[in-house]
Image (cartoon, grey):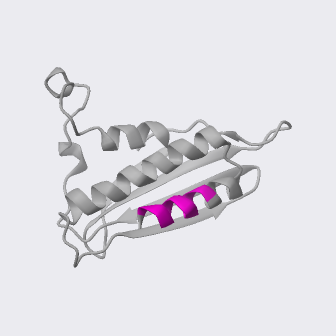
Amino acid sequence: MLDFVQIVSDHMSRGVGLDEDAAHWVSVAIRESVINAIKHGNRNDENKHVFVEFEAATGAIGELTIRVRDQGEGFDPQEVADPLAPENLLKSSGRGIFLIRNFMDDVKLQRAPEGGMEIRMVKRVQASADGPTPAVGGLS
């Protein structure tokens, strides 16, 4: 599944005009979110699915939106430990959401109406005379 998601991510990133570097970090964010959905959301239950949806918009500002949803019980995003807190710096995990928020322009975590958790990630590309460049965005 991850290989297929990688191929789609690369194709969609090029389609909205992301440069190679930005496309790489988008791919890392998507991969991290899918792994989190499998491992933490679905708790490695092979009977549960992870859904990945891509949406591309082109124009003066290109935008790639990715939604990843699991079938787990969900969690409160406010309760995720701060990976930069001194007690968490040496832990081998716990940085996924932090990294995703830094790689993408907009990130929202919420309980999905269908059940499970959904992460919605957006990367924007501002078109310029020299070609598209990643836009600067905020976090949610």
- Residue appearing at x 38%, y 38% in the figure: 99
Q: Is residue 9 magenta?
A: yes
Residue positioned 26% across, 26% down in the render:
84
**Residue 59: image location, x then y, percent:** 76, 55
On whether residue 135 falls in the magenta region, the answer is no
Q: Residue at x 55, y 44 (%)?
A: 24
| Number of marks | 0
Q: Quadrant of the C terminus?
A: top left
Segment tinted magenta in the rendering: 2-10
Taking the view exactly as shown, the residue that stands out farthest to the bottom is: 47
Q: Residue furthest right?
A: 129
Taking the view exactly as shown, the residue that stands out farthest to the front is 3
Q: Quadrant of residue 2?
A: bottom left
| Relative side of 124 to 36, left or right | right
**Position of the N terminus by quadrant:** bottom left
Residue occupying image coordinates x 17% and y 66%: 73
* Residue 41 visible: yes
Task: Name the quadrant containing residue 115.
Answer: bottom left
Where residue 98 sits in the image (x, y, percent)? Answer: 34, 38
Magenta span: helix, strand or loop, mainly?
Answer: helix
Between 112 and 13, which is closer to the camera in this rendering?
Answer: 13
Q: Residue furthest top?
A: 86
Q: Is residue 30 above or below residue 21?
A: below
Residue 121 percent location from the top left of the image: 46, 53
Where residue 102 sits: x, y (%)?
A: 44, 36
Residue 108 visible (yes or no):
no
Would residue 99 appear left or right of 84 to someone viewing this image? right
- Residue 5, compared with residue 130, is above or below; it is below
